[in-house]
Image (cartoon, rainbow, N blue to C red):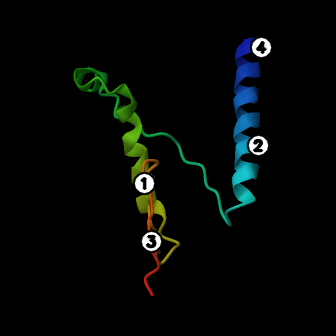
Amino acid sequence: MVIWSLKINQFMLLDLLFRETLLTEFDEVTGVNVLDSEDSANLALLSRPELGITFTKLHCWKLTQYSKCVFLDADTLVTSSMSCG
């Protein structure tokens, strides 16, 4: 029980340090809970178990406090300005 608690605290500390690093570059950093499809059988057929958490992107629709929002996936490469004028 103590070991499990220690592991959680280590992850929380890493998360806190990573968040602080991000805040040096961005005005706002918001953590979200992972949304998992829990469809391991079909994901195994695709040999892509990591796709189970792609539903986490749906949190973007909760960002109603902004007039504009752009979601960039980790494999996105921006090659020119994305401003709307």
User: Where the C terminus falls, by quadrant?
Assistant: bottom left
Q: CA distance from mark 4 to mark 2?
A: 22 Å
Sequence order check, earlier mark of 4 and 2: 4
Which is closer to the viewer, label 1 or label 3? 3
Q: What is the quadrant of residue 9 in the picture? A: top right
Any mark on residue 17, and which?
Answer: 2
Any mark on residue 76, and which?
Answer: 1
Any mark on residue 2, and which?
Answer: 4
Assign a secondary structure to mark 4. Answer: helix
Which is closer to the viewer, label 2 or label 1? 1
Assign a secondary structure to mark 1. Answer: loop
Which is closer to the viewer, label 1 or label 4? 1
Amino acid type of the residue that numbered disc 3 sits on in the rendered structure? Ser
Amino acid type of the residue that numbered disc 1 sits on in the rendered structure? Thr
The residue pinned by badge 3 equals: 80
Q: CA distance from mark 3 to mark 4?
A: 50 Å
Report x, y in % for residue 46. 24, 26
